Amino acid sequence: MALITLTSASGSPGVTTTAVGLALCWPRPVLLVEADPTGGSAIAAGYLRGGAAPSDSLIDLALAHRNGALLEAIPSMTTTIPDTTVTLIPGTRAHGQSRSLTSLWEPLTEALRDLDALGQDVIVDAGRLGLVGSPEPLIHGADLTLLTTRCDLVALSGARSWAQTLRNQFDEQGAPGALGLLVVGEGRPYSTREVSAVLSLPVTAALAWDEPAAAVFARGESPPRRFQGSALLRSLHSAATAIQGRVAANRDQLAAATPGRA
């Protein structure tokens, strides 16, 4: 159905934790791609606690692309997260490898979009904006890119200029609807309406602040009591529904604006 990219402006708003949580709550098979250029797999070290992580990574995909075998390599370089329908491609092992991925991002974006025909969605953790090796084609070529931010003044101050930059870029692409906000910790202290007004972007989804539940996705900790009914799990399921709805609406608008498009 969709290629969804999560990114942030600064700090640690919870992009990786959110990406993992969304993937595990997603209603269809989903590929989780760790495209954060900072290096080291936060997912392998965190949620997977150093176990069950694949030996291959994005650097191996870059090598496959150079050999003209990117599409064939993607399935063989993923691993299934145990007891889920989520597959994972971990990020680079060190930040210095990110420069080697520059030529990979654009063809990888196209390849991941093609997975839609196979009934598989893709969630990308793009890390922080502005870093060397940032996966810009995955940010600008996604069906929906979500600038992820907390609701406090420091986070909003850091996100404000990047929100404007992204708005301008998506407007130039003719795809303003493909950019939205994902708010972490709604009401701490500002509401989604206030966040949207400050950043001049629509809030696509909001997640509850629930540290014990978040630790399951961030650090692989044992689920707390009533985890399945926790505020975070409920908000993740709601977010998944809202994201799918936004993507569907964008596609309907595109079809209506494109003569002959089904």
Image (tube, rainbow, N blue to C red):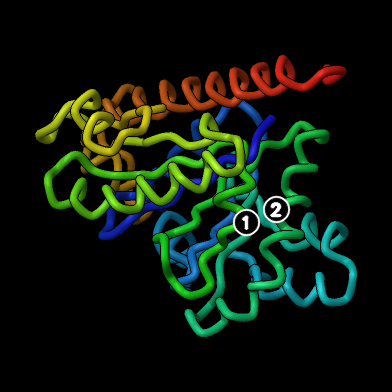
Regarding residue 85, the answer to whether it shows in the image is no
For label 1, the crowd category at 10 Å Cα-Cα, with few meaning under 14, some 14 to 19 and many 20 or more, is some
- Which residue shows up at 71% across the image and 60% down it? 106
Regarding residue 57, the answer to whether it shows in the image is yes
- Which residue shows up at 40% across the image and 29% down it? 236
- From the image, tell me which residue sits under label 2: 109
Q: Nearer the viewer, residue 35 or 99?
A: 99
Q: Quadrant of the C terminus?
A: top right
Spatial separation of the CA atoms under disc 1 and disc 2: 7 Å
Residue 203 in percent (x, y) is at 35, 28
Residue 17 in percent (x, y) is at 38, 48
- From the image, tell me which residue sits under label 1: 137
Q: Nearer the viewer, residue 187 or 120?
A: 187
- Please tell me whether mark 2 sits on a helix, a strand or a loop: helix
* Residue 19 vertical position relative to residue 29 in the rendered view, above or below: below
Q: Quadrant of the N terminus?
A: top right
- Which residue shows up at 35% across the image and 46% down it? 163
Q: State if disc 2 and disc 1 touch (CB < 8 Å).
A: yes
Residue 212 in percent (x, y) is at 22, 42
Number of numbered markers:
2
Residue 191 in percent (x, y) is at 18, 26
Q: Amino acid at mark 2?
A: Thr
* Mark 1 / mark 2, whichever is N-terminal: 2
